[in-house]
């Protein structure tokens, strides 16, 4: 923690701490998350000079790292120069809005603050210590835009198959979809996602035939190193996916035997129609009850066609969990017991399917409150596919509800590194906010939840979290505004409802639940009936 001077921090100017105008320019770029090399480029300084400035800044602020420096500057409220402009002569002001973000490290979590005026890209990610790859969205060559879901499904399946190869680092498919429809140099993609290899391609589905064409590029060299075509009957779609994964692994690490790629095999069902229904049930978001129910309708049809389809059970169970998160239905409507039933079937039939396992694990913890069993399933999913950003994220969320903030933040950070271009920013920041909230750290929770609401201003979970946080911080009017928005979205939500929905998964964290409910009560959420 920063050791700040005594008295009102806002009364201290940079000059009083011996910080020069030149160092203020460096500090402004530090607050934007820029690396020393990036600062050199912006300010035209030599790297040793920048290092000296950074050391002097840390010493003047009496802190040990950049995170603590950012927090100290936030407390001082200094008006920092923007993008290398001249500072405003050591004035004190509030013109620079600061926001929390998670460092995109691998396996560790830290927090920094950056200016909201910063429109530059984050600094390049460090390459992992093992071969790394992203599978970009495949072009749909079927001539029917309605078949886009099928091409996306192929990307997701190949990503998961590659993720199960233990010596690979694989970026989540949702980050890859940020490049849909864009023409971007593979070298730039490698820098932005922190990967060595980029797989692109196309899918053509005609009647009962499918053709997959893949091109693998070395992002560091900016050139293609492999290309191949895979085609066959739709009934053999999983074999085609396995062949793609095996060929890629053999190209990336030719010294390793193809046996390594055999571990990537995943055949969730023999019934292609059931699999097609499963893909249709995977919308980019499940933001409405109607959308969620349509997914369930498709999944129940898939299960009828193949009663041993573990991933379909898992996704159906997770759809029931989503209804808890958004409070679309309230106990005791029977949907909780149905979600739990589906969870056990997912764990049984999908015992070797990492996707089925993380969905089942999160649902078991969230709906039934069986957190030990839920975490065991999630951990098995991660063991089978350590590259699953979704599994790491649900693990973080489950630990957050238990009050295990340090573990939760670490797992959110791992998910972020695997999915650096995730389009669901609100979910990432909401998870961080919940981790802080349920462990009793309300100020950082407020910063994180504000970031979540920037991405999705009407997110019911984020609005509920913010209402509680504001209530606990004494920011009552801001909390009441959140409650007004919550009730506009769901007039039936009450303290009693929130307690009934959250008590099972927070049984071992009673203080966290008590704080949550107290915050909502202070913000004006109606009590309801127990």
Image: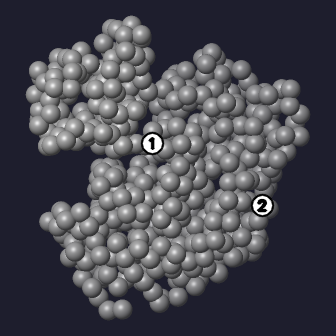
Q: Residues within 10 Å of mark 2 (few under 14, many from 20)?
A: some
Instruction: Report which quarter residue 298 is drawn in.
Output: bottom right
| 525 w.r.t. 278: above or below | below
Q: Position of residue 130 (x, y in %)?
A: 70, 31
| 113 w.r.t. 505: above or below | above
The foreground one among 467 and 316 is 467
| Residue drawn 42% across the image and 11% down it | 47
Work out how far the residue at label 2 is from the one at label 1, CA to CA, in angstroms: 33 Å
**Can you say which quadrant of the picture contains the N terminus?**
top left
SS assignment at label 1: loop
| Residue drawn 44% across the image and 27% down it | 123
Name the residue carrying label 1: 110
Q: Position of residue 87 (x, y in %)?
A: 16, 21
SS assignment at label 2: loop
Q: Is residue 116 visible?
A: no
| 443 w.r.t. 164: above or below | below
Relative horizontal placement of residue 331, taking residue 156 as reference (left or right): left
Relative horizontal placement of residue 294, taking residue 301 as reference (left or right): left
The foreground one among 174 and 58 is 58
The foreground one among 318 and 81 is 81
| Residue drawn 67% across the image and 30% down it | 129
Q: Residues within 10 Å of mark 1 (few under 14, many from 20)?
A: few
**Can you say which quadrant of the picture contains the C terminus?**
bottom left
Relative horizontal placement of residue 243, taking residue 138 as reference (left or right): right
Q: Position of residue 301 (x, y in %)?
A: 64, 73
Name the residue carrying label 2: 352
Q: Position of residue 174 (x, y in %)?
A: 53, 46
Answer whether labels 2 and 1 touch (C-beta < 8 Å): no
């Amino acid at each position: 923690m920063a050791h700040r001077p005594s008295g009102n921090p806002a009364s201290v100017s940079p000059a009083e701490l011996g910080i020069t105008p030149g160092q203020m320019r460096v500090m402004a770029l530090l607050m934007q998350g820029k690396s020393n090399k990036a600062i050199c480029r912006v300010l035209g300084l030599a790297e040793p000079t920048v290092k000296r400035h950074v050391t002097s800044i840390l010493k003047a602020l009496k802190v040990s790292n950049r995170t603590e420096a950012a927090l100290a500057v936030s407390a001082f409220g200094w008006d920092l120069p923007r993008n290398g402009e001249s500072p405003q002569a050591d004035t004190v002001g509030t013109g620079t809005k600061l926001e929390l973000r998670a460092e995109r490290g691998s396996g560790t979590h830290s927090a920094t603050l950056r200016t909201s005026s910063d429109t530059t890209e984050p600094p390049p990610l460090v390459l992992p210590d093992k071969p790394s790859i992203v599978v970009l969205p495949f072009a749909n060559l079927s001539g029917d835009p309605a078949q886009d879901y099928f091409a996306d499904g192929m990307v997701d399946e190949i990503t998961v198959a590659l993720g199960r190869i233990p010596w690979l680092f694989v970026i989540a498919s949702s980050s890859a979809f940020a490049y849909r429809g864009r023409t971007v140099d593979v070298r730039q993609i490698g820098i932005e996602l922190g990967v060595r290899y980029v797989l692109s391609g196309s899918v053509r589905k005609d009647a009962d035939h499918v053709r997959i064409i893949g091109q693998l590029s070395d992002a560091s060299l900016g050139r293609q190193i492999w290309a191949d075509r895979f085609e066959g009957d739709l009934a053999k779609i999983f074999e085609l996916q396995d062949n793609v994964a095996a060929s890629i692994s053999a190209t990336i690490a030719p010294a390793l035997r193809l046996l390594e790629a055999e571990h990537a095999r995943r055949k969730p069902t023999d019934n292609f129609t059931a699999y097609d229904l499963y893909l249709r049930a995977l919308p980019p978001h499940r933001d409405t009850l109607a959308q969620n129910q349509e997914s369930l309708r498709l999944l129940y049809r898939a299960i009828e066609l193949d009663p041993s389809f573990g991933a379909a059970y898992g996704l159906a169970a997770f759809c029931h969990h989503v209804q808890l998160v958004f409070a679309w239905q309230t106990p005791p409507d029977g949907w909780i017991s149905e979600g739990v039933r589906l969870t056990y079937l997912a764990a049984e039939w999908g015992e070797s399917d990492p996707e089925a396992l993380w969905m089942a694990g999160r649902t078991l913890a969230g709906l039934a409150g069986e957190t030990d069993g839920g975490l065991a399933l999630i951990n098995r999913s991660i063991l089978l596919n350590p590259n699953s950003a979704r599994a790491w994220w649900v693990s973080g969320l489950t630990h957050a509800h238990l009050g295990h903030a340090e573990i939760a933040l670490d797992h959110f950070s791992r998910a972020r590194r695997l999915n650096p271009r995730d389009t669901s920013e609100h979910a990432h920041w909401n998870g961080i906010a919940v981790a802080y909230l349920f462990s009793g750290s309300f100020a950082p929770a407020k910063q994180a939840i504000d970031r979540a609401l920037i991405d999705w201003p009407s997110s019911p979970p984020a609005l509920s979290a913010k209402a509680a946080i504001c209530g606990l911080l004494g920011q009552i009017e801001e909390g009441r505004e959140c409650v007004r928005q919550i009730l506009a979205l769901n007039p039936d939500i009450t303290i009693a409802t929130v307690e009934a929905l959250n008590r099972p998964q927070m049984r071992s964290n009673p203080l966290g639940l008590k704080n949550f409910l107290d915050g909502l009560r202070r913000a004006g959420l109606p009590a309801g009936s127990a």
